[in-house]
Amino acid sequence: MVIINDTTLRDGEQTAGVAFTRKEKVKLAIMLFQAGVTDLEIGIPAMGTEECLTIAAIRKALPKAILMAWCRAKNDEIALAAELKLDWVDISIPTSQQMITHKLKCEPATILKKLEESIYYAVSLGLKVCIGCEDASRAELDFLIAIGQLGERAGAQRLRYADTLGLLEPFTTYEKIKILSTGQPLAIEIHCHDDLGLATANTLAAIKAGAAYANTTVIGLGERAGNAPLEEVVIALHQCYQQQTGIRLNSFPALCLAVSKAAGQPVPRQKSLVGARVFTHESGIHIDGLIKDIRNYQGLDPGLLGRTHTLVLGKHSGMAAVKAVFARFGIVLDQVQTGKILSAVQEFAINRKRSPSGKELLKISSRILGAIS
């Protein structure tokens, strides 16, 4: 079973313009844990006193959760993680030649030496270690394998493969993770960004290739285009591979709403799975098919998320849809009445660029039925 290590409270908060309060971070951490997300990356101790106090508050609120902090290969940052009584530390190092040369301006051997020392130090403090391979998707696989082998000798348990710039596609992801999973001994954690809209697909490919852990964020928060959305990864695993994560699917609507509110980031109406309109039907052909047998146009049962199908009327509606919607109001229409109401609804939708509300539908029907009688 793949383990979700959600990083909404660390990488998610790195979304431009997003800043959670301590109260919000504690609330969201509790909601995640109650939803079944037991592994959480919750912050960066090096950010300062306020961040450390927030991390401590989450630790106090969730004594049974598995909590991780993000640190550089610096002993003072690692020591803070230990003082905060965290379980894991992600020791992040650049791994691509681009970043080694142009960001750190050093040699690979220097990075390996510093990493080894940091792992030994973290383990000595009782922390479990994940090696965060920044920009891994542009790194040489041989170098990543060497990092994994060094990590095992020093006491690390996990290697985070980060597609930091969101450059991967699923086929390459699968090939690279397959090689890495057999070429080095550490458990692999996949961390994907969504710059090409492929973060979820890349995460699934990595899991299929052997990754045991996956980083996610609620509603895909994160740097630039964000990270692989928690809800997409979990439900795709359930739907496509019948693979369970221990996370309650019906918790997603409330969880996504809470994160959206705290982040000040509205969820698009057509956002997969949790958008307001993703189980809404207007097309006459689709509604007719749903009425006859819901399986005709239901690939994913909205009930899994605690949601239901919604029928609306608009430009693309048909006679069956009009009859079905008005039947829910307790109004039985004949063919003539249905046709006239359909024409009025289509005119409304074209002129106003939206579907009429229930109240507006009743107003339309009252006018038309009154005129007919």
Image (cartoon, rainbow, N blue to C red):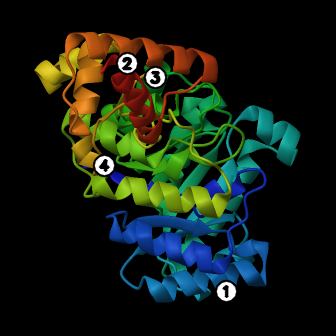
Which residue occupies the foreground of this view, 69 or 184?
A: 69
Q: Position of residue 153 (x, y in %)?
A: 47, 59
Label 4 belongs to which residue? Answer: 2
Residue occupying the point 60% across, 60% down: 261
Q: Position of residue 158 (x, y in %)?
A: 45, 55
Disc 2 is placed on an element classified as helix
Residue count near mark 2 (Cα–Cα under 10 Å), binned few <14, some 14–19, many ≥20:
many
In terms of sequence position, does the residue under pointer 3 or pointer 2 come before the other? 3
Q: CA distance from mark 4 to mark 2?
A: 52 Å
In terms of sequence position, does the residue under pointer 1 or pointer 4 come before the other? 4
Any part of residue 139 in sight: yes
Q: CA distance from mark 3 to mark 2?
A: 48 Å
Label 3 belongs to which residue? Answer: 170
Disc 3 is placed on an element classified as helix
> Residue 211, relative to residue 39: is it above or below?
above
Label 1 belongs to which residue? Answer: 53
Q: Given the image, on which type of amino acid does mark 1 rest? A: Leu
Q: Given the image, on which type of amino acid does mark 3 rest? A: Pro
Residue count near mark 3 (Cα–Cα under 10 Å), binned few <14, some 14–19, many ≥20:
some
Residue count near mark 1 (Cα–Cα under 10 Å), binned few <14, some 14–19, many ≥20:
some
